[in-house]
Image: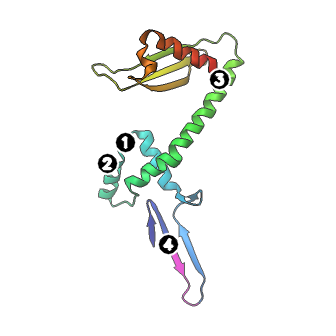
């Protein structure tokens, strides 16, 4: 028996012939990754949890899991690119639908700090109350040249977004 993160592989070999069999406790994705390992990485990322704390809980419970390094490898190679691809496809569908709609209303906002704190990053958000959905958002550094032109930055980002639509 062998472990691979959250997956168990049981190998069985006949003592009289050379026939062998392997049983996997979960499906393999892309001929390389155990499905449970990827789902765990996705769940930790979506929950906003600390991977080291989650793995510590697993260890205290006696559960098999992968390493922190494996989590970050899953995140960078599969989870984040997949989420980004899905968002871009969904966003394109929203924009296509809005282009076909008459009298579309747009709202935008930017936020660069939280109450009592000075943030390093800010977010621009564009939404359409016509369909009640966020259509675009962008994270930018607060010190960047885009943000320093305080008076023109909202207008600049609005124009850039509307030009892309």
Question: What element does badge 3 sit on?
Answer: helix
- Dot in front, 3 or 1: 3
Ranked by sequence position, the earlier of labels 3 and 2 is: 2
Question: What element does badge 1 sit on?
Answer: loop
Relative horizontal placement of residue 99, taking residue 85 as reference (left or right): right
**Label 4: few (<14), some (14–19) or many (≥20) C-alpha neighbours in 10 Å:** few
- Dot in front, 3 or 2: 3
Where does label 1 land, which residue? 49
Residue ranking furthest to the right? 100
Ranked by sequence position, the earlier of labels 4 and 3 is: 4
Ranked by sequence position, the earlier of labels 4 and 2 is: 4
Tell me where residue 68 appears, x and y as whole percent: 38, 53
Tell me where residue 44 appears, x and y as whole percent: 42, 45
Tell me where residue 62 appears, x and y as whole percent: 33, 61
Quarter that holds the C terminus = top right
Spatial distance from mark 3 to mark 1, Cα to Cα? 32 Å
Residue, x 47% and y 55% (percent of image)? 37
Where does label 2 land, which residue? 53
Marks 3 & 1, CB-CB < 8 Å contact: no
**Label 1: few (<14), some (14–19) or many (≥20) C-alpha neighbours in 10 Å:** few
Residue 145's disc is: none
**Label 3: few (<14), some (14–19) or many (≥20) C-alpha neighbours in 10 Å:** some
Ranked by sequence position, the earlier of labels 4 and 1 is: 4
Which stretch appears magenta?
10-16
Where does label 4 land, which residue? 10
Spatial distance from mark 3 to mark 2, Cα to Cα? 39 Å
Spatial distance from mark 4 to mark 3, Cα to Cα? 49 Å
Where does label 3 land, which residue? 95
Q: Which image quadrant is residue 117 in? A: top left
Spatial distance from mark 1 to mark 2, Cα to Cα? 8 Å
Marks 4 & 1, CB-CB < 8 Å contact: no
């Amino acid at each position: 028996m062998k472990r691979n993160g959250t997956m168990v592989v049981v190998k069985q070999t006949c003592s009289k012939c050379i026939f062998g069999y392997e049983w996997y406790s979960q499906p393999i994705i892309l001929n390389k990754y155990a499905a449970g390992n990827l789902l765990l990485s996705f769940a930790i990322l979506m929950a906003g949890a600390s991977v080291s704390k989650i793995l510590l809980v697993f260890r205290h419970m006696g559960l098999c899991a992968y390493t922190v390094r494996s989590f970050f490898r899953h995140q960078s190679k599969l989870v984040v690119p997949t989420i980004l691809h899905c968002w871009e496809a969904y966003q394109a569908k929203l924009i296509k639908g809005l282009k076909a709609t008459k009298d579309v209303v747009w709202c935008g906002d930017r936020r660069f700090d939280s109450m009592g704190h000075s943030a390093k990053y800010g977010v621009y958000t564009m939404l359409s109350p016509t369909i009640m959905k966020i259509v675009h958002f962008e994270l930018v550094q607060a010190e960047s040249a885009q943000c320093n032109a305080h008076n023109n930055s909202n207008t600049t980002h609005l124009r850039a977004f509307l030009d892309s639509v």
